[in-house]
Image (cartoon, rainbow, N blue to C red):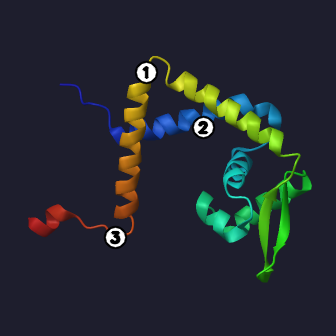
Amino acid sequence: MPSSPNISFVLHDVARLLRKRFEQRSRTSGLTRAQWQVLAFLSLHEGIHQNKLADLIEVVPITLARLLDKMEVRGFIERRPNPSDRRAWLLYLTPQARPLIEVMRSNGQKTRNEAFAGLPPETQQQLLQTLCLIKSNLLVACTQPAVDREKLHG
């Protein structure tokens, strides 16, 4: 009897292939995936503190600082002083970055269209709801110590 696919592996593969396809579409921009991720989060959270952005994209602050340095030199982001904390910087997109946001959104939509070809809209919506529930469950679980329940009851 053949074994069924492991959902964790399939989810990982789908996420990897979505990133790969997006990167193929976006190659001509000269931006890395990490830089696209910074632009995406900044488009939603302009004026965010560097450390908060590092938390959101799950990188250590020094890694983000190097990334931001490169993006600032290229004219995509600017750091502005935080009026309530002279030691902190707030991050903003520059006018030069705004067209890239539209390219990113368009490339993302084209990639999703390819990925969801043949799936009716209601199935897509159900998949999204299911994945959001799984994410929510895991976010809660990650706040608690991992316990092997079988060992507790066995």
Query: Is 72 left or right of 105, judged from the image as shown?
Result: right
Query: Is 97 located above or below residue 79 in the figure?
Result: above
Judging by the rendered image, the residue that carries numbered circle 3 is 144
- Gap between marks 2 and 1, in whole Å? 20 Å
Judging by the rendered image, the residue that carries numbered circle 1 is 119
Judging by the rendered image, the residue that carries numbered circle 2 is 19
Q: Which is nearer the eye, 106 or 57?
A: 106
Dot 3 surroundings within 10 Å: few (below 14), some, or many (20 or more)? few
Circle count: 3
Name the residue rendered at 60%, 37% in the picture: 19
Q: Secondary structure at mark 1?
A: loop
Residue sticking out furthest to the left:
154
Name the residue rendered at 77%, 65% in the picture: 65
Q: Quadrant of the N terminus?
A: top left
Q: Nearer the viewer, mark 2 or mark 1?
A: 1
Observer able to see residue 106: yes
Amino acid type at circle 1 is Leu
